Amino acid sequence: MSNPMYSFSDDCSPLSDRERVNLPYYGVDVRPAHERIYDFDEILLPFDEQRARFEAARCIHCPTPAACVTACPVHNDIPTIMCLIEKGNFLEASQTFRLTSTIPEICGRVCPQEKLCQGSCVHNLRNEPVLIGPLEVFVTDYERSVKGSITIRKGAPSGRKVAIVGGGPSGLACAERLINFGHDVTVYDQRPIPGGLLMYGIPGFKLSSKVLMAKLNELQNAGIHFVTNTFIGKDITIDALFNDGFDAVYISVGAGVDAQLNIPGEDLPGVFKGTEFLIRSNVNLDLLPPGMTTRPKIGKRVAVIGGGDTASDCERTSIRLGAQEVFCIYRRTEDEMPGVSKDRTFARQEGTRYLFLTQPIRFIADGNGKLTAMECVRMELGEKDAKGRRSPVPIPDSNFILEIDTAITAVGYYPFPSIGETGLDVTRNGLIAIDSKTGATSRRGIYAGGDAVRGPSLVVEATADGIRAASSIHEYLTKL
Ligand code: SF4
């Protein structure tokens, strides 16, 4: 018996204009969906001074420890900052963010605030939370617009050299703090431009590459050396770094290997992996890594498989690349989705439709070998797994065919297998094992953090790891 074609029911029908207008409002002002889907510019409309002061004045300055500060992985002093913004002291507010964070202008844009600072705001009990993220963006952009660029403090030269392996948020945070301590820092990165997922993974409609480029220039002006297109483990080994005179190494290579669905047809043309799709879609062609130097050719009906932030990014990118219909396929319900609801709201506004409790089981090609459909099976939630999440279970005889011409898989990431060749102790999952207080690995003088240690994590968590490791490395170097 052949499987029925999918017919769209209420769970997946496009939203009416009225429904789109009535989607949850997150307080932030964004460009209208019908305008923003035609470009990759940031969708956030910045606060002006009056709006920023009004918003900050809503903070009731909870006593220490304020829940928002505890929930922020770098523990920004939010009540003090809100006080400064309320009074119009925007420069001081920005500098207070910089005391605890190396990239507040980026975290304000990409943090899932609903799960962190804003999610812990006491106002949630009755009202909307104070919009801490947009205020972070406002004051840090204000500082840069007034000053032109931010000067990063350089400590007195210590005579010690540190290599950072991986120039993503964690590596850049560690590098900046080590420069503050006076150490000589070199950042190695496998791609043509440092920044990791900040450059290659987060689309421009969430984070303009101009913001990152400004930060990279400031780091370079502070004396940090960048060595790009260099893959540690292949082009140069950790041992060679020590032989070259480095006194310590921080490993922050991220988790850049896409997980596979392991179903038939996954290697068909038209089936993309989420990471590669975003890299090839979002970055200027001259900045693309070797082997990824062309834009992905997508069709008209795109299925994105996964429920995290990368899935939302792929959906919204597909729409901007010209897809007419975009479906998000997820095997549990929306309640179990790991991605932030704000991004899903934006994806819905831009036209993404959701098929929950659905699992693809094979990709189907036409006679010419081109992707033409995907066979799926309906799921239901069964028993809870070890993490307390109810496991999806296939419903017998519920298979159906969804016609698509492009698929993008965004179902998780693994660390680079080369981590296992560093000689460092690794965990069962292939992540680098560290001392959780210091970030020290099993080898003397080598520290690690970010996704290579945690698995897929937030930009701000990776940043916190880099800041903490820099203090540990500084302590280690002063005892040498
Ligand atoms: Fe909130 Fe993130 Fe800023 Fe912390 S870094 S205050 S969690 S937006």
Image (cartoon, grey):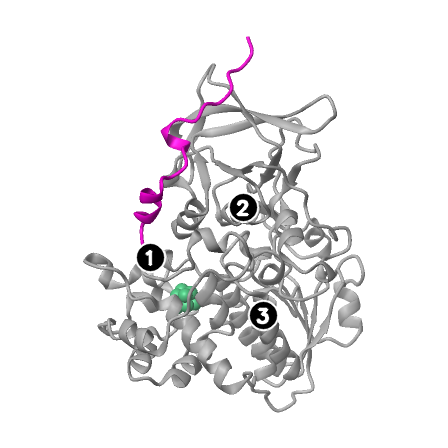
The answer to whether the residue labelled 3 contacts the one labelled 1, judged by CB atoms less than 8 Å apart, is no
Q: Which residues are magenta?
A: 1-25
Does 431 sit left or right of 347 as displayed?
right
Q: Quadrant of ligand 1?
A: bottom left
Tell me residue 153's x, y (percent).
Answer: 56, 87
> Which residue in the protein does label 1 denote?
26
User: Is the distance from the Cβ of mark 3 to the nearest ligand 1 atom less than 8 Å?
Assistant: no
Does label 3 or label 2 sit earlier along the sequence?
3
User: Which amino acid lies under the numbered mark 1 shown in the image of this protein?
Assistant: Tyr
Q: Nearer the viewer, residue 64 or 2?
A: 2
Left-right relation of 157 to 286: left
Q: Residue 237: horizontal and vertical position, in percent? A: 78, 62
What's the distance in space between the residues labelled 3 and 2, CA to CA?
A: 22 Å
| Cα distance in 3D space between marks 2 and 1 | 22 Å
Residue name at image x 62 percent, y 65 percent? 195
Q: Is mark 1 within 8 Å of ligand 1?
A: no
- Location of mark 3 (residue): 210
Q: Residue at x 53, y 15 (%)?
A: 3
Depicted 355 relative to depicted 476: above or below:
above
Main secondary structure of the magenta stretch = loop
Crowd class of label 1 (few under 14; some 14 to 19; many from 20; radius 10 Å) = few
Q: For mark 2, what is the residue?
A: 319
Q: Give the mark nearest the N terminus, 2 or 1.
A: 1
Secondary element at image label 3: helix
**Vertical position of residue 376 compared to residue 22: above or below:** above
Q: Residue at x 49, y 47 (%)?
A: 312
Residue 274 x %, y %? 60, 45
* Left or right of residue 17: residue 236: right
Residue 230 visible in image: yes
State whether label 2 is within 8 Å of ligand 1.
no
